[in-house]
Image (spheres, rainbow, N blue to C red):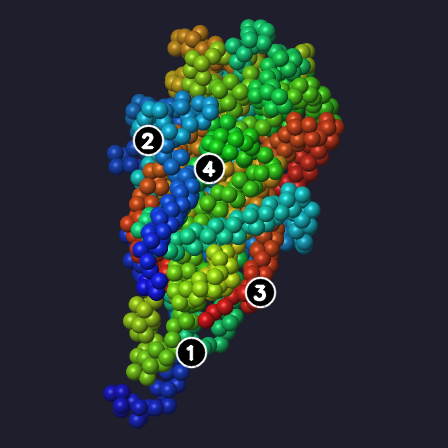
Amino acid sequence: MTNAYNPKHYKRIKTAKSVAFQIFALLVGLIIVFPIIYALCISFMPSDQILSMPPRLIPETITLEHYKKALESTMLGRYMLNSLILAGVSSVIRVITASMAAFAFSFFEFRGKSFLFAFVMGTIMIPGDVVLITNYQTVANLGLVNTYLGMMIVFMVSAMNIFIMRQNFLTFSKDVKEASEVDGCSNFRFFATILLPLNKPVLTTVFISAFISTWNTYLWPMLVTNDDAMRTVQVGVTMLNFPEGTVYGPIMAASILVLLPVAVMFIIFRRQIVGGLMGGAVKG
Amino acid sequence: MKMKKVISLGLAAAMTVSLLTACGQTTEESSTSSDGNVQIEYWHTMSGVNGEAMEAVVNTFNETVGAENGITVKSVYQGDDVSEKLKTLAQANDTKNFPNVAQIVGAGVPSALDYEQLIKVEDMYEKGENITVAKEDLDEHSVRAFSYQDELICMPFNVSSILLYYNKDMFEEVGLDPENPPQTIAEMAEACEKLLVKDGDTVTRYGLNVAVRRYQLANWIGGQGEYNFFGNNEGGRAGMMTEVTFGEDGSLDKFLTEWQKVVDTGAYKEVEDNINEEFSMGLFGMAIMSSARIGTIDSLVGDKFEWATAPLPKVDAADTGGTAVGGSCLAMFDKGDEAQVDASWIFTQYLASPEAQIAFDTATGYLPVNTKVYDEADMQTYMEENPNYTVAVDQMRNSNVNVQEPFDIINWELDEIIKNNMAEFGAGNQDKDTTCTNIVEQCNEKLAEYARANG
Amino acid sequence: MEKQASFTGRGRVKKKKRLSKRIEPFLYLAPALIFFVGFTYYPFAKTVFSSFFLVNSMGEIREFVGLENFISVLTNPAFLQSIKNTLIYVVMSSPIAIFIALLLAMIANRKTKLSPVYEMLYAITMAVSMSVAAMIFQLMYNPTIGILNYIFNTHFNWLNDKKIAMIALSLIAVWLNIGYNFLFLLSAVRGISSDLLESADIDGANFFQRTFKIIVPIISPTVFYLICNSLAKNMMMSGLVLILTQGAPQGSTETMISFMYKQSVNNLNYNDGYAAAIIAFIITSIAMAFSFSFEKKGVHYN
């Protein structure tokens, strides 16, 4: 930050500019999170105020009634736990399957490699929903309806994850691999002790993106669970959307309850997540 | 078979890697619980206030009749997709995950008939074991609603009737008689016109809000004359319905001609956004909804204004058919366990018993399916205190039993066709004749498609 | 031991090694391939196969009908509209979400005292799940009690007007994807060496020139990844439709997958369902091929 011409007033202007810029940036941020703020306000607003005209944002009086109702009529805590297990475990498995496959694609020459790569990438274009019913039949035949495994099984591998890992591994210096070969290091040892540790950021990225996408899935968990105690958050929240009379208060309360822990986790682990993404994104 | 083996092998490998076997734990299914009771699973679709009432009825059963007979019922709320869930289970032939008893909507009865797991209620009555609710006590309208070829397929449980809801204060304000609501669609159109309030070109208050869908149309078609069927084979109750008949018999045209009068007022809102909330906010004077919403409207309106219900306005003043029974029934399934079937039968009858019906109906506003209910003092008091509810009861009991919603397996598809065309008609984008031809042709096309694949 | 082997059985060991070497890559691929075969290709093949048959409501095959199912859906205005809707949705949501995220990344790129705070705000939508967003926007879009019409002083019937309902759904998708795209783009932008940016500053390039002439080409691999990612996701969108609109009004929010889902699950019409699935697959393949051709031209790897 050394500058050749650096008089004091220039610095002051720069500070003022910077403050203005930061306020601007902050305002933009508030617009982006507005829907969340809105949900938060509504969740504390008594029903008659929600139904008032014109609509209001700030509750006149605060009520916890909606939270009570949301917690009474659903098993939100259990839903959260289910989603956490579903997303967490299947993401770990995804990282494992993806890194192994990407390793084969980026460090080996073998017959049918390009065919297999196309075979893998082709799955991106096969929508999971297309094969919903058939997959359900498979899962039912394996006796996995209403189990965590049944919910996870279709999420244990993702071509997109393999793709992004391969992109990363390809930028990995071939010299290191050759050097390790000269040292008599086996492929698996190279993979497990050199490649993976050096690519931690991309593993984090893949884990995070896998976690988010499984956390967000809606149709499949709805289909393979019919026990209330096995439902995920995604399905559980919409269960408050009653056909006879929508009850916005409790829905917003439930939304906030679902959102809060994830947001807090997100804030706490921001450094790891952003760090992971920084190192993990396709190298520019 | 080989495929399955390969998959399971792969799974086994993945499981070992992730050490997740502990998480894959499932609740062990067994027909008897630890206290030696027969355990059965019951799926229902009731949420909110209705859900609480449902749970209360199940709990009472477990504490009384259930305890006496060694039965424990586990109730599971399934959202409003029970029929879909059952379809999926049936396709995968996944008997293990079937419930013992499930609450399904009337339109779901014909597809349930295809499931080999289904036990017809009629067969249980014929067997004659453990009968606690006589078939004769069941309301004939409800019996007809859930019967196919004169056999009772599912036990009636919660039924409702379609009503006109109107804002009495608003009626008074514009010079309409609040004690004398419109009895025909034409009269309703006149009321609509008077209720309209405009601010320049924007309508700030409509006369009427209703989206005409399959449910509403079935009532207006069915109620014409003495009674009138929606499609062939008695609207699907004597055999598979393969075409709609409201085109050729002129009943759709007759309805649309009347409905045109409503549309022409410019005071008709043809899409439903939040019909409950908007009615309570006074955004329109009349709405057409199921009687199951009386409780919801009651709590939303509070003491903001006076409102009441009235019988569904008729297409023609001379029509005597009345309205159809809307609602749900209880389907029983055989999971291969005799004790569970017996338990399910006792539970199913309990839900249709006067005791359970009074508890459930007075808490929710659904109509009785058991005529013995009307002899009970509790119900008589309830009806006196709730005139809006009584309107629905009377309308149902005065209707012809042949006025019913059709048994059309592809009800979703017909609903969409009717809804889309009626919305275009209601918005003035499509004339009467096109609407009539479109609905008839599109419905018949879809019904023919289904009949071809399943006939 | 090893030494001995190298003397006595050299040839055999070599052969063994060669064989194990040949098998080795497949061992790494095996877990992924097993899952792909079992839960993607096998059911997909079954779907393709079934699409040439008349299938009854229990999903059982009745008779061979050739291309009849395809002709049936392709002459069905509702399905044609769902294709159009899907494309509108993709075109509306994918680029806009990336574009907004890019602008946000440019803002957040400069590190200041408050930058951790607004970085957080920009990224937070990543923590919001689809159904929660659907619930919140459902209320915001409500024509009478929702806040959007009030703020903008409009009278839109967001989810019930066939002209704007699809746009309304796209907006939710844009909002949901901003966070994810932002984090990716921010890391890419921060990865650019400061020398390069400074030299651009000295050249007197303004914000937009700097963004689109210098930065975008450098981070093009990330942009490409995001495009592929959102294309694949948005082409298959059905959740928002099934939760919020069920394809209404007038089929204006029906997507290819929601059409397929409703045909198979609600209407038990697997004939239309399977054929729609295959057509959705073909259309998505074309879109992906299109974006991969963009990779050859517009993406610069160092």
> Label 3: few (<14), some or many (≥20) within 10 Å?
few
Along the horizontal axis of the image, is C236 left or right of B56?
right
Name the residue type under label 2.
Tyr
Question: Mark 3 near mark 2, Cβ–Cβ under 8 Å?
Answer: no
Q: Mark 3 lies on which chain?
A: C
Along the horizontal axis of the image, is B449 left or right of C267?
right
Q: Which residue is drawn at 64% across and 15% down?
A: B193
Circle 3 sits on which residue?
C293
Quarter of the picture holding the C terminus of chain A: bottom left
> Label 1: few (<14), some or many (≥20) within 10 Å?
some
Name the residue type under label 4.
Phe
Circle 2 sits on which residue?
A67
**Disc ID at residue C137:** 4
Question: Mark 4 near mark 1, Cβ–Cβ under 8 Å?
Answer: no
Name the residue type under label 3.
Ser
Quarter of the picture holding the N terminus of chain A: bottom left
Q: Residue at x 36, y 35 (%)?
A: A40
Give how far across and how far down residue B29 sits, in percent: 34, 42
> Label 4: few (<14), some or many (≥20) within 10 Å?
many
Give how far across and how far down residue B115 sits, in percent: 51, 39
Mark 2: secondary structure: helix
User: What is the C-alpha distance between the residues marked 2 and 1?
Assistant: 60 Å
Q: Which of A227 and A22 is in front in this view?
A: A22
